[in-house]
Amino acid sequence: MTDEINDNNHESQPDKPETPLLAGETGEAQEHLPPPVNERFKWYIIHAYSGFERKVKESLEGRVQAFGLQNKIGRVMIPTEPVTELVNGKKRTVERVFLPGYVLVEMDLDNDLWHVIKNTPRVTGFLGTGDKPVSLTEQEVSSIIFRSDVSKDKPRMKIKFEKNESVRITEGPFANFNGVVDEVNEDRETLKVMVTIFGRSTPVELEFGKVEKSVE
């Protein structure tokens, strides 16, 4: 799979919107996912190469059609959030992946399907131990996908953060999680914070206003 990494160094946008739309794409915050169309479907997290989440989504959806897996795989979703960027003096809002390397898939998982997923380009495995993927509850998936705060314009923050500094997340689905600052982007007023999620240390990108310094 090493040769797959260099074939495309940018994320391509999907040809059509996600189904269902994520918070921020509709302009309205949603709290819960619609129920699954198949009662046997459960949600799983697939690990992918960071930066190739959309490519993995496209590949999985292509395999659904190619192998006739409509009754085995449902929704494929990428956790994103709306972020305002300043480009050439103009503001534009983009959907940014906020959990790099994570793709959520709704499916009726069995041994054959496990192999189909594992053999998908840029997929490195499932969330779980060994060969036993762990399913998520609807509540866990909703807490990851949907965010109540979709404000796009934030005042500039005066507080300064430093690499390796301990912080606490104050807003969003990971509120009250503690983490360690890995990168600081002063221009975009964002931090990359390493947070332990489902037993795995994961980089989460956050705006300055969504974290605070941990009290020693």
Image (cartoon, rainbow, N blue to C red):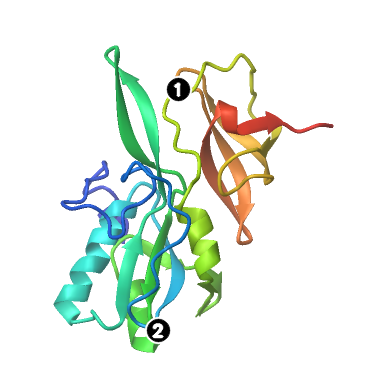
Front-most of residues 130 and 215: 215
Badge nearest the viewer, 2 or 1? 2
Mark 2 to mark 1: distance in Å?
Answer: 43 Å
Residue 93 in view of the camera:
yes
Q: Residues within 10 Å of mark 2 (few under 14, many from 20)?
A: few
Residue 40 x %, y %: 40, 85
Q: Residue at x 31, y 53 (%)?
A: 21
The quarter of the picture where the C terminus appears is top right
The residue indicated by pointer 2 is 39
Q: Residue at x 59, y 35 (%)?
A: 182
Q: Residues within 10 Å of mark 1 (few under 14, many from 20)?
A: some
Q: Residue furthest front?
A: 28
The quadrant holding residue 68 is bottom left
The quadrant holding residue 76 is bottom left
Q: Amino acid at mark 1?
A: Arg
Residue 165 in view of the camera:
no
Q: Is residue 106 left or right of residue 157?
A: left
The residue indicated by pointer 1 is 188
Residue 215 x %, y %: 81, 31
**Relative height, residue 13 to residue 213 (above, below):** below
Front-most of residues 42 and 115: 42
Residue 5 x %, y %: 30, 51
Q: Residue furthest right?
A: 216
**Relative height, residue 148 to residue 187 (above, below):** below
Secondary structure under tag 1 reads loop
**Relative height, residue 104 to residue 146 (above, below):** below
Q: Residue at x 38, y 68 (%)?
A: 105
Q: Amino acid at mark 2?
A: Glu
Q: Earlier in the sequence, mark 2 or mark 1?
A: 2
